[in-house]
Amino acid sequence: MFRKAFHTRSNIAIRGSDRRKLRSTICEQFPRLDADQVAELTPNKDDMTVMKIITHADCIVYVYCLTGTPVFFQIEKQLYPTVYTLWKHPDLLPSLSTWPPVLDKISGGADLMLPGVVPQNGGLPQLSKGQLCAIALVGNQAAVAIGRASMATVDMVANGMKGRGVQVIHCFKDMLWSIGDKSPLPDIPLPNLEVDSKDRNSSDPSSSPEQGNPLPDAGQDEKGLHLDGLSLEDASARAAGDDVRVGEQEEVEEEDPISASDRMDKLLYQCTLHCLKSSVKSTDLPLLTSNFYRSHIVPCCPEDQTLDMKKSSFKKLSKFLQMLQGQGLLKVKEEKKGIDFIVSVDKDHPDLRSFIVPTSTSETQDPRDSKNQPAASGGGSFQVKLLCGVSGDMLPVLRSSGYSKGDWMTHETLRDAVTNYIRLNDLVDKADAKFVYLDGTLHDALINRSEGYVDKLRWDQLFSRCNGKMTSGYEVLVGGQRSSNPKSVRKGKLQPIQLKIEKKSGNKNVTVIQNLEFYGIEPKEFAHRLQVGVAASSSISQMPGQGSGSQVIIQGKQIRFIETLLTDHYNIPKKHIQGLELAAKTGKKKR
């Protein structure tokens, strides 16, 4: 229910009478909690609020928060504890255990299937159909999800532990969990009886039925218990996938799925070594892990191949980085909750030292340069790279991609970051993919108060509003390189090079050239070239106004020569030069 974005309608402090009513409801629906425990969850002096939210399925839910952390939520008249509450009171609900890899499936939107249930503490809890229960991981009592049992315990056993076990309502790392302090999953020891050591230490449910499941199916001794068997896919699909005889095992292992996974692992590791040796510099560290994969690993993939993390055995970037850290190749540190950075790389690692960059790309200094090349605004090597700065309105949307307020990004990277946020929060309209639902964050960032509540926008409307909420800026590149000016990125629109003819003392004409620095042109160098070319004295002075750049002054009316110098030598397009019409006026007066 909360694995998709929801809209917050209100968030107000709870009144004393409502607090007392809440306590009464908790005592009635959760008799395992005594009076002191209920008072601890709803204290008189601490701040408590109640949020009214509308889920993606248009369900009205009231969320009760204690100092910002959700402790209970109410659907119609039924109260449900959050995982935060279950971590403090792990015995509040009966609990089913499953393998750690199944958590990814639950977080992705699946319910818990019975093949993934691992009995602990002597067996399964006694459940009735529709009873509220928790889901935990093997060897840990901390709940990762709550839901309702799809069938009674006796029916689970009678069906051979096949079918749907629990309909998940709320889980660890969903949108409801993100309202709180985003605490990581704690390690709560099991009470009294302990799980068999083989079960506790095994993170791969591919062990034998005796090790992984005390309730094996009839005939399971002739089948291997694979991870697919513990996934949350439909039971019928699992039954079809498990119908493999022992004599066919070797043939199955030689098929594409397994070999494709191995090939993807090798390609992933090759691209990682490539980027660590060619594009990742010490000045880039600390580097956001998502940017490391998107901006460094992916560009190093050969043109005839496609890199896909989901087709590897790691499935997730975090698991792949854990493997690299275990090998000592790099070090990952969690700077903030949910945001990891690569803080160091071991350049002396044997694999990295022995890796040879492929000759087809060895001439490329940075693989990232092959992607997102800025379009030239004029001829030759002169280029204008249009940028947008992260504003306060867009910061909540872009923070998940590692951007901070004031960071500059291209319109392409802005589009990618916004798309990543939409995909991450599953906001695409299932009925019409042309539209995107607006969660609270997007609504606050893009919709003005005068417009009222807007449920969804088309993709083009959304991107247009995102661009409008960003700070406009630009960067000038000459020869594909950044300007020598340390402040090469500037706000606003690119100002043209100004050419003016003025009269100085003695009624002498001089030509004034302004805004050269914006185009990566050093005023001293330009003044020297101009002085030699027209055989006239030149000078450099500060432009009027605080914070303005320098201006070059040359004796005489030198518009035509300056035009040739700017267009032919510096490759500046004429559309970026203002004042060229003065040359035509001068020529008419001479005739």
Image (spheres, rainbow, N blue to C red):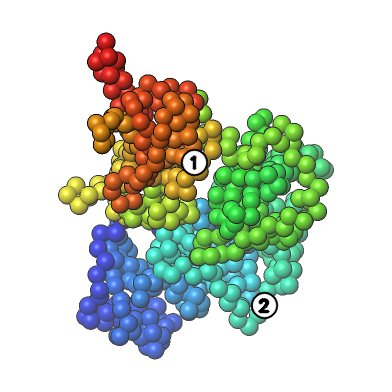
Residue displayed at 68% across by 73% down? 195
Pick the front one: 242 or 191: 191
Please report the residue visible at 28 percent of the width from the left and 48 percent of the height from the top.
545
Does residue 126 appear anywhere in the picture?
Answer: no
Q: Nearer the viewer, residue 551 or 591?
A: 591
Q: How many marks?
A: 2
- Image quarter of residue 125: bottom right
Residue 192 image point, x, y percent: 63, 83
Q: Residue 483: which numbered mark, if any?
A: 1
Tell me the element at label 2: loop
Which sits in the foreground, 199 or 123? 199
On the image, the x and y values in percent for residue 25 come to 31, 77
Q: Position of residue 83 (x, y in %)?
A: 46, 70
Q: Quadrant of the N terminus?
A: bottom left
Q: Quadrant of residue 157?
A: bottom right
View extreme (front): residue: 506
Residue type pointed to by label 1: Ser
Looking at marks 2 and 1 on the same chain, the residue that comes earlier in the sequence is marked by 2
Q: Are marks 2 and 1 in contact (CB under 8 Å)?
A: no
The residue lying at 38 percent from left, 70 percent from top is 70
Q: CA distance from mark 2 to mark 1?
A: 65 Å
Label 2 belongs to which residue? Answer: 194
**Pointer 1: residues within 10 angstroms few (<14), some, or many (20+)?**
many
Point out the frontmost of discs 2 and 1: 1
**Residue 550 versus residue 191: which sits nearer the camera?**
550
Residue 409 occupies which quadrant of the picture?
top left
Q: Residue extending furthest left?
A: 450
Q: Using the rendered image of the protein, determine whether residue 479 is visible from the camera's viewpoint.
A: yes
Q: Height in image: 33 above or below 353? A: below
Looking at the rendered structure, the kind of residue marked 2 is Glu
- Give the answer, above or below, for where 556 lies relative to 88: above
